[in-house]
Image (cartoon, helix red, strand yellow):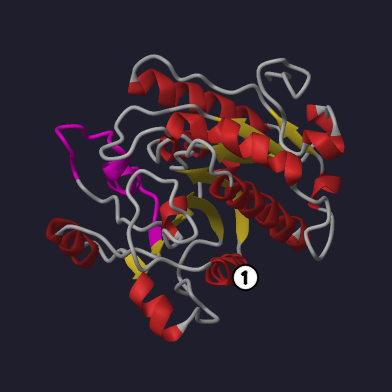
Amino acid sequence: MNTSNASDSNFTGFLHSEIGVTDPTDSFFHIIPAMFEKSVSYGTGTKKGPLAILNASQQLELFDGKGIPARRGIFTQAPLKCADSTEQGLMEISAAVARVLSQKRFPILLGGEHTITLGALGAIETQDELKQKVGVVQFDAHADLRDTYEENALSHACVMRRAFEMGFPIYQIGVRSLSSAEAEFRQVYNIGYYDAERVAKNGIPKNILPNNFPEIIYISIDVDVLDPSIMPSTGTPEPGGMNWYQLMDALKRVMDKRRVIGFDVVELAPMEGFKAPDYTCSRLIYNLMGMIKRRL
């Protein structure tokens, strides 16, 4: 395993200001920054997202309001540059996530564009103990179910279509922008969803996931699921998104009676001199660690 951490000079580990340099063998949470940007179609800058999140995390309190998630151990791997082709970048991500899973640790993937989720799902496929179905819970403003976008089947706009083709059941939360073809695909293939308009009108139901959805889940969070008033620093902002407490509540409900094996946070495109969205992402990640720690 890559044992680089906050001692490297070119990046700072998650919460290094509070926990210092950590040992991967003593850490349950493994942060994998993936500086992957190959197919963004509007705003750019997602490859800068991982380092912005790591830098913002230095301002977090160890206490998340209920406990100290960092006591489970947080190790930050050296950022994956993903400088070559899309396929090679995804292989690099898959290898990193697979190493963490094989050691019974918890991978947290920082994007980068949403395509990186395919790297994590590819790693899940390699794990013998996860041969049973793993469900993907997607928080997103967009359905990402296009077959191709701008003649690219590995576009960030196609990530959930590829995940579906890999055999992963999908449930979408917070969507408020999709093509007619994507809407039809949802209906034909029975893709579950709880869209942003329903969140706004009805709140978060107690049992947001269907009873027959897999017990083991992977969570993928495109930060544009949040309203642009909260998260303007993203490539394709869409009005009408979830607020902070709706997202926190939805995450808690999603994890009820289910086991989370990893998650990613993607599509942050940092704005120079505007730090609030970067900090929001780091807080989101740490809050999720806390939810997972308490379930353990």
Q: Name which residue lies at 16% across and 35% down.
A: 150
The N terminus: image quadrant? top right
Q: Residue 178's spot in the image, x, y percent? A: 22, 59
The answer to which of 135 and 282 lies nearer the viewer is: 282
Q: Is residue 154 left or right of residue 107?
A: left
Classify 10 Å Cα crowding around label 1: few (below 14), some (14-19), many (20 and above): some
Residue beneath the point at 83% across and 50% down? 62
Marker count (numbered): 1
Magenta range is 147-171
Q: Is residue 162 visible?
A: no
Does 43 sit left or right of 9 as displayed? left
Residue extending farthest to the bottom is 202
Residue 12 or residue 93, whichever sits in front: 12
Report whether residue 277 is seen.
Answer: yes
- Tag 1: residue type? Asp
Q: Position of residue 6 (x, y in %)?
A: 75, 24
x 50%, y 35%: residue: 272
**Quadrant housing the C terminus:** bottom right
SS of the residue under disc 1? loop
Q: Which residue is mark 1?
A: 256
Relative to 158, does residue 154 appear above or below in the rendering? above
Q: Relative to 222, is 153 above or below?
A: above
266 in the magenta segment: no
Q: At x 54% / y 24%, what residue is drawn?
A: 95
Indicate the position of residue 157 as horizontal and vertical percent values.
Answer: 27, 44
Q: Residue 229: name its quadrant.
A: bottom left
Q: Could you say where residue 8 lies in the image, as x and y percent from the top left? A: 73, 16
Q: Is residue 155 magenta?
A: yes
